[in-house]
Amino acid sequence: MVRRRALLQSAALGAVSALVGRSTVDVRLIRPGDAAYGDAKLGYFTQYDAQRPSAIAKVLTPADVQRCVEIARQERTRITARCGGHSYPGYSTADGALVVDVRGLDRIDVRPDGTAEVGAGVLLMDLYIALANAGRMMPAGTCATVGISGLTLGGGIGMTARQFGLTCDRLVSARIVTPDGVHRTVSETEHADLFWALRGGGGGNFGIVTSFVFRTEPARDLTTFALAFPSAALASLLSAWPDWQGRAPDALTSTLGVGSGATPHVEVSGCFAGTQVNLKPVLDDLVRRAGAQPTSRRETEQSFLAAMERFAWCRAGDGSCRPSWNGGGGSQPRGSYVATSRMLTKPITDPQELADIFRNTPNSYNMIDGLGGAVGRGPETAFPHRGALASIQVELSLQAGEANARRAMGVARDELGKMFGANGYVNYIDPQMPDWAQAYYGSSLTRLREVARKYDPDRVFTFAQGLA
């Protein structure tokens, strides 16, 4: 991999050589034709492998990021940031874009006061390991190779959300290169409007974050659980689960997972910030409400890190939590599916209808992730779904081809919209989402657009579902 002073000195990115000649900043650049380009351009999803960014800038410092933003602004070059590369529509590996790969910004500093400074390129499992080693924990997601940046900027739903809130709720401050090229600190007292927007306003909209400071919690043992139910119990479980989750202690966050087909897999799994003894009566109550005995039931007390490994389906010590692409050096497989979302905003009045939507969405797995608790009581941020009971994510494999998967996904999304409203979670961004801006940002949309206009009047950070 080469290291070039002449950043972006290629015809593919326009006539930037005069600007580059004035630069005093070296940036690691990979362009079409370089041996490393084929791997460096890849994101998590295989269906976007044919996309060809104009260049991938391997940034190592905030000054590198500033240089990239400077050129994008002055030459009107499309620019996008990439951390974990899990953008559902492939926006972080877009055709013709300068991809600013922030994975080199991977420093983690867990401080004596319990805050943690986390580089924008850190992946979730690396964060969990560093926190656990320091005796700390914080709420975040379940996929080992998701980047902390995209997760935080969209909100950050995870398996301890009801106890500890969203990932963005733990944010104390951030450092961001805004579209004017300035490296700013944002917090409740500095650029408070931008700080508000970065907590739920979605990735890619306001600049490129270089680091975060989070409040963390003392690490504690957690009890993870999974109850598999007979397929025939699906409708009764869908009827019982929302009220049960809503009345459960904040210490419990659960997911109701449903497969597709005539006899779908049905499971309630999750995490309890407490002991197995205290969890047992809560789960017994769910079984009573569902009116069906689970076909299997597991409850395991384990450390914070072990619980995060379980949810990620990997082990931190054997490489299975590390990316197998982009020089990650691990064996974590890539994804081949599409996804969409809605928010569960009210009780499920027709559980059989919802069961039929899940069953009839071919090659799908559907997840209803509990919210409420600390999420509903969270601080004032751009995340607009504080009152939602849960999020609903619909994932479809590409077994029948991407076009067929997207058609089936659209049917499910629109049927769910009729039941629960035209809304969705921006971290599960869907390129075909109707009225996407209102769906993702709701009551925050007007203010978010004002912030975008203020900090990005020249529309440097633009993409198909961008606020600028």
Image (cartoon, helix red, strand yellow):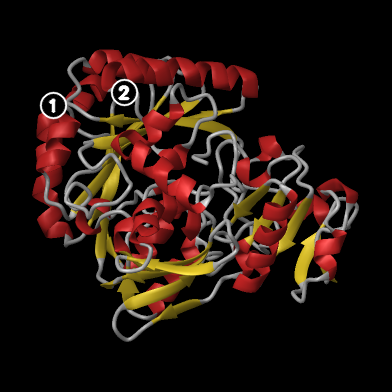
Residue 439 seen anywhere in this rendered image of the structure: yes
First reached walking from the N terminus: tag 2 or tag 1: 2
Asked whether, in this view, residue 359 is left or right of residue 324, the answer is left
Nearer-the-camera pick, 440 or 307: 440
In x, y percent, where is residue 19?
80, 63
**What's the distance in space between the residues labelled 2 and 1, CA to CA?**
13 Å
| Residue at 12% across, 33% down | 243
| Residue at 33% across, 61% down | 192
Nearer-the-camera pick, 10 or 191: 191
| Residue at 66% across, 50% down | 79
| Amino acid identity at mark 1 | Gly
Among the 4 quarters of the image, the one containing residue 348: top left
Q: Is residue 206 above or below residue 24?
A: above
Q: Is the residue marked by circle 1 packed among few (<14), some (14-19), or many (20+) residues within 10 Å?
A: few
Nearer-the-camera pick, 114 or 463: 463
| Quadrant in which the N terminus is drawn | bottom right
In x, y percent, where is residue 320?
57, 59
| Amino acid identity at mark 2 | Ser
Q: Secondary structure at mark 2?
A: helix
| Residue at 29% across, 40% down | 384
Asked whether, in this view, residue 19 is left or right of residue 255, the answer is right
Q: Secondary structure at mark 1?
A: loop
In x, y percent, where is residue 153?
43, 52
Q: Is residue 460 above or below residue 238?
A: below
Residue 267 seen anywhere in this rendered image of the structure: no
Q: Which mark is residue 291?
A: 1
Asked whether, in this view, residue 193 is left or right of residue 15, the answer is left
Q: Are marks 2 and 1 in contact (CB under 8 Å)?
A: no
In x, y percent, where is residue 425?
39, 37
Nearer-the-camera pick, 48 or 385: 385
Q: Is the residue marked by circle 2 packed among few (<14), some (14-19), or many (20+) residues within 10 Å?
A: some
- Residue labelled with disc 2: 231
